[in-house]
Amino acid sequence: MLRVIATIFVIIIQQLVNANNYYNNATLQKYGKNVCTIEEVFYDGNNDLPTMYREHGLTLDNRQKQTCGHITLSRNECCEGFKQLKGLPGCTIVKSPNNMLETIKLLGANEFARYAMQCGLFDILEIGGPYTLFVPTDEAFAKMDKSLKLALVSRKLTTSELIKYHVVPYRLITHNMTSNTLLETLNDGLHLRFNKHFNQVETINCVKLIRKNRIAKNGVVHLINTVLNPHIYSNRNLVQIINQNTELTIFSKMIETSRMHQSLKETFQTYTVLAPIDNVLRKLPNNQLSRILDDEKLSKEFILKHLLPTTICLSAITEGQIIKTLGDDHSIKFNCDALNSATTQGYCIKSDLKLTFNGILYAVNFDLSNYNEGKTVLQIMNDMGLTEFLQIVNIAGLAQTFDTKNMLTVFAPSNQAIKRQYLRLQCVQNTFGVEGQLLNLQHKVGFNGIVHLTNQVLMPSTISVHDIISKNNSFSIFMRAVNLLDILPATSPEFCGNHNTYFIPTNNAFKKLGIDRLIWIFNNPLYMRTILHNHQVERVLSTKLLKKHWQYEIQTKNKTIILSHRGNKLMVNNVEVIEADLMTTNGIVHVVDDLILPQY
Ligand SMILES: *[C@@H]1O[C@H](CO)[C@@H](O)[C@H](O)[C@H]1NC(C)=O
Ligand SMILES: *[C@@H]1O[C@H](CO)[C@@H](O)[C@H](O)[C@H]1NC(C)=O
Ligand SMILES: *[C@@H]1O[C@H](CO)[C@@H](O)[C@H](O)[C@H]1NC(C)=O
Ligand SMILES: *[C@@H]1O[C@H](CO)[C@@H](O)[C@H](O)[C@H]1NC(C)=O
């Protein structure tokens, strides 16, 4: 009989070994068969004693030597169920299995054994079965949660109920289980949630399994580092649990407004919800909060930013991790602080988690000041520190305009931009500009519009192309030509500018032709018109929108010209632009010191 049992165990253990991916040729050669790696994490202030163990199925080479910044040592020992035959590599002797009580004691978990025996669970440990036990270490009992202790003292929870919550009435080996499995315990059908995390950490109710799969005659034992609290699990769904939490009344209202009840009640998807508590949400400016609470779309966006499509157990975080939320383009960074707490964005997540039927709930105290949902453009400009522009807005009596529900797009200049000096949109390929200034499209979306930050002040121009030419003696010859032909057009503002670009030649440029040629041109208006048309483009071309290493083919009113850079100089064909980007009411002016002559 005993031999039959022993043979069965050889088969089971052999299956485990085969199932494990880490057991590769290299480790086989180095350590021999059935060697397991135990990682011990040493936390500060704890002289020499490791306070966390993490077991890997089999030997891993080159594992990280730090866990959340704490020194992590690895050592190898025989995997559970095996021992070494003297003189041979690896662990090749299969031990005869113990009963669960003996297995627990071998793991050093005497408190659990004591409690279990005290409340008459002798048959579970010694003769009954098969069972799976999640056994807390003695240290775990010593640092048991206050609320749990209180429940025991006040007899809201009996020791028997507590112990039974650690017992599942069938045999469970972690290799067999998939993440998010709910396991029914002996405590009145209350469940445990099993999870596997990407870093191979496995948890039960978000408590780390530190030694796994100790196979006993009458069951399986897993060692854990925290006493499991039956009160953190509920068979209800996330919405029900949020609704009954007195610290989450505002978040609960948002769920209602956003009409997301249904998806948060789903049974086929597991979420992690990081729900900001009322105290934090109340710190949002009052009108911002009420706008969110009044608006289905805004509430939904807000909720989605606090919803993770996976199960995140804080205890399983071993290094900084960025996790995408269900919000658009939004993620949350988790850092690890200490053994059982994690932070996101520098704020501690209280580990008072609730495990529900369809996910995990954390009540959090995030800082939400960078949340733009429901803010007006005025508030956003305030947050962005655009004090100079806001002053102008106030002086101009426009604060009301920016603080209403109207949709606006604001090209807000930065403070530095205003302190130096200078609203039309331009585009060259997919580069955009306003008033000749490159537009930084990293925008912030507010409730009533969009704020784009530009690095220059945008002032409506007050002078026209005509003003520039007529008021500067350097352009007198060009002016005479323009008057002769009457060619400066009136234009209307349109998207991407039906305004013009003028390459205006200086007198010097004309004089380079020689006096005879100049007189000839002035006597041939048709040719003069061609020249002038060659200096005019029927769109606004700001040099700030041109990329240095590209060449741009531009259609003038006559021929095609090429705009390019030669070093820092802008060239039109072979002609240098000596002054660029003079913005006017009806176009942009670049000054050239040579004529751009039509080439036939
Ligand atoms: C590694 O394992 C494979 C199959 O398990 C075997 O064919 C191969 O010979 C092994 N290589 C070494 C170096 O042991
Ligand atoms: C566990 O895995 C083994 C081997 O893969 C399989 O034979 C057994 O049926 C599995 N048990 C459960 C409960 O899934
Ligand atoms: C006239 O134009 C020339 C050439 O662009 C420029 O250097 C000069 O500063 C201008 N003069 C005035 C008074 O604007
Ligand atoms: C450019 O000017 C020449 C000479 O006046 C004329 O023949 C030609 O049609 C013009 N081309 C365009 C595209 O206007």
Image (spheres, rainbow, N blue to C red):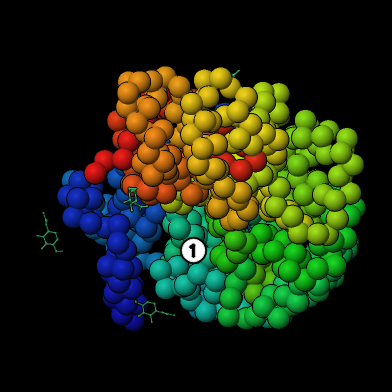
Closest to the observer, 243 or 464: 464
- Residue lying farthest to the front in this orientation: 523
Q: From this viewpoint, is residue 63 visible?
A: no
Q: Is residue 27 left or right of residue 40?
A: left
Closest to the observer, 283 or 11: 283
Q: Is residue 29 left or right of residue 21?
A: left
Residue at the spot 83% in from the left edge and 59% down from the top edge: 405
Q: Is residue 126 above or below residue 285?
A: below
Residue at the spot 61% in from the left edge and 35% down from the top edge: 466
- Residue 179 percent location from the top left of the image: 50, 69
* Amino acid type, callout 1: Lys
Secondary structure beneath dot 1 equals strand
Closest to the observer, 400 or 509: 509
Which residue does the numbered mark 1 point to in the structure image?
196
Q: Is residue 314 left or right of residue 240?
A: left
Q: Is residue 59 above or below residue 18?
A: above
Q: Is residue 521 above or below residue 492?
A: above
Q: From this viewpoint, is residue 358 visible?
A: yes
Residue at the spot 45% in from the left edge and 22% down from the top edge: 507
Q: Is residue 35 left or right of residue 306?
A: left
Residue at the spot 33% in from the left edge and 47% down from the top edge: 560
Quadrant where the N terminus is found in the figure:
bottom left
Quadrant where the C terminus is found in the figure:
top left
Closest to the observer, 419 or 68: 419
In the image, is the residue at mark 1 within 8 Å of ligand 2 by its beta carbon? Answer: no
- Residue 397 percent location from the top left of the image: 90, 42
Q: Quadrant of residue 3?
A: bottom left
- Residue 33 percent location from the top left of the image: 23, 56
- Residue 545 percent location from the top left of the image: 48, 40
